[in-house]
Image: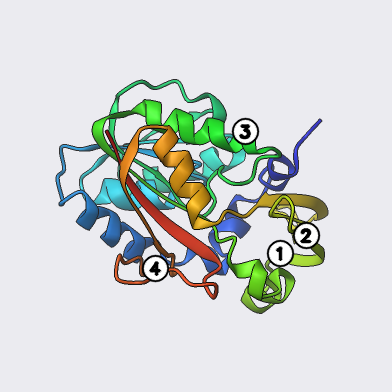
Amino acid sequence: MTRWYEELFLDYADHYDHEPYTQGTAGECDFIEKEIGGDKKKRILDIGCGTGRHAIELARRGYRVVGVDLSAAQLRRAREKAAAAGVSIDFRRCDARELPFTAEFDLAIMLCEGAFPLMETDEMNYAILRGAARALKPGGQLIFTTLNGLFPLFHSVKEFLDREKGEGGAECRESSFDLMTFRDRNVTSVVDDSGNKKELRCDERYYVPSEIAWLLKSLGFRGIGIFAARLGAFSRADALTPDEFEMLVVAEKE
């Protein structure tokens, strides 16, 4: 059975690159560089790299990057873009729940809901964090964004997604947020790169900050910081509130 996120990214690379939420790459990489002190010797793992926008920008800046993603179509586009940019990146097709790395990286990034928190169960999402922790060297850093569980307590997810929709972008309907599981289930309509319209029954997990902090502590992370994730302008100065749709998480492996 094909999962909704697999179906979405079968043929959605070009459209994905034009979605409004993918337009903050340079500013987000500025934040990443600042967090690692501009140290070009550090090796970076991009989990759920998609079409490679962060991986390519970081490689342009001189960093060594490995990008992993479940979608062959997204990876094809990533390789095309990397070749056009003249950068060398090791892109691999890989399930984020089964990362094959142990203590190999100084930094792992997982941005714009790259894999986490799209999984069907909490255990699957946890497996992604566990794999990221295992991939890091002692003292390595993890930077990721995820859906802010405080947001749907005060706002409508559907109204937010409708407001953020760009021309030709995905449309959300029948959104239903479950307070017992903190999952939003909705029907999302997209037009893929071949012009076909698809209707996907999506199921995404929202997390409150205390849950994220507990999960990371259980995996041996310390120095956990949780902030507002603002498109193209990540900053430790931006406190998380119920008005932010996403949270930015920064942690260090013990």
Mark 3 to mark 4: distance in Å?
28 Å
- Amino acid type at mark 1: Ala
Mark 1 to mark 2: distance in Å?
6 Å
Mark 1 to mark 4: distance in Å?
20 Å
The quadrant where residue 26 appears: bottom left
- Amino acid type at mark 3: Met
**Mark number, residue 124:** 3
Mark 2 to mark 3: distance in Å?
22 Å
State which quarter of the image contains the N terminus: top right
Secondary structure beneath disc 3? helix
In the rendered image, the vertical position of residue 198 relative to residue 154, given as above or below: above
**Mark number, residue 178:** none
Residue located beneath label 1 in the image: 170
Residue located beneath label 4 in the image: 232
Going from the N terminus, do you reach mark 2 or mark 4 first?
2
Secondary structure beneath disc 1? loop
Q: Is residue 158 left or right of residue 85?
A: right
Mark 1 to mark 3: distance in Å?
25 Å
Q: Are marks 1 and 2 in contact (CB under 8 Å)?
A: yes
Crowding at dot 2, Cα within 10 Å, few <14 / some 14-19 / many 20+, comes out as: some
**Mark number, residue 188:** 2
